[in-house]
Amino acid sequence: AQSVTQLGSHVSVSEGALVLLRCNYSSSVPPYLFWYVQYPNQGLQLLLKYTTGATLVKGINGFEAEFKKSETSFHLTKPSAHMSDAAEYFCAVSAGGTSYGKLTFGQGTILTVHP
Amino acid sequence: GAVVSQHPSRVICKSGTSVKIECRSLDFQATTMFWYRQFPKQSLMLMATSNEGSKATYEQGVEKDKFLINHASLTLSTLTVTSAHPEDSSFYICSPRLGEGSPLHFGNGTRLTVT
């Protein structure tokens, strides 16, 4: 069984400040990890994913995340927030093999960016 | 990335009627499609997995007779909400499975409101 915990349902930052959205996972098998962004009344856009290999993953729009197995974490960061980053962000985990693609999502973190 | 066209984007129906939601893959073939739903202010939950040419598999607590899934071709999967009730009002969204480790993209979702 897998689970995802996103610490902080709401995060507020100033424009230009560092964005840090936290995600911890629980998985009995090596996980595949994902971050998605959802704007109001829209679908999900994939920001980045970790499968294997390099633990620091770079995604779109300047976001990146680091897979830390020892901490079971996959936190999302962006050095400088833009107003357009205001949205809800979801961390998700999938097992591999025949279960690949069955995502378990965290509860989401709403990011607010202040001018 | 894999483009998934989901229709309709928004639908309002009366209680007791049925609604069909389509997910069509435009530039690839998917033998497997995942269907999720998202209740207001909540995260996404996997409802069912559709497999081309075979019966869908449903997650615990999802009524298979209420949520009919058809995956008759490699480019089209449909979800029909039968005898819809207000509690079925939700955001329904599909995600195709490609190879293991491949990006997991989503359709734009369907906002269902049952009055």
Image (cartoon, helix red, strand yellow):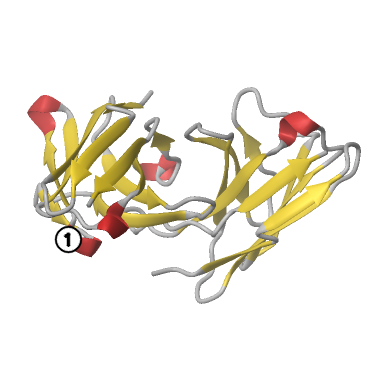
- Residue located 43% across and 53% down the image: A39
- Residue located 40% across and 45% down the image: A100
Residue nearest the observer in this picture, B87 or A25: B87
Circle 1 SS class? helix
Image coords of residue A43 (percent x, y): 50, 54
Q: Is residue A51 above or below residue B40?
A: below
Chain of the residue on which disc 1 is drawn: A
Specify the amino acid type for callout 1. Gly
* Relative to A11, A53 lies left or right: left
Q: Is residue B15 above or below residue B110?
A: above
Residue nearest the observer in this picture, B4 or B43: B43
Q: Which residue is mark 1?
A: A62
Residue nearest the observer in this picture, B52 or A76: A76
Q: Quadrant of residue A71?
A: top left
Outermost right residue: B16
Q: Judge whether residue A35 can be spotted in this image.
A: yes
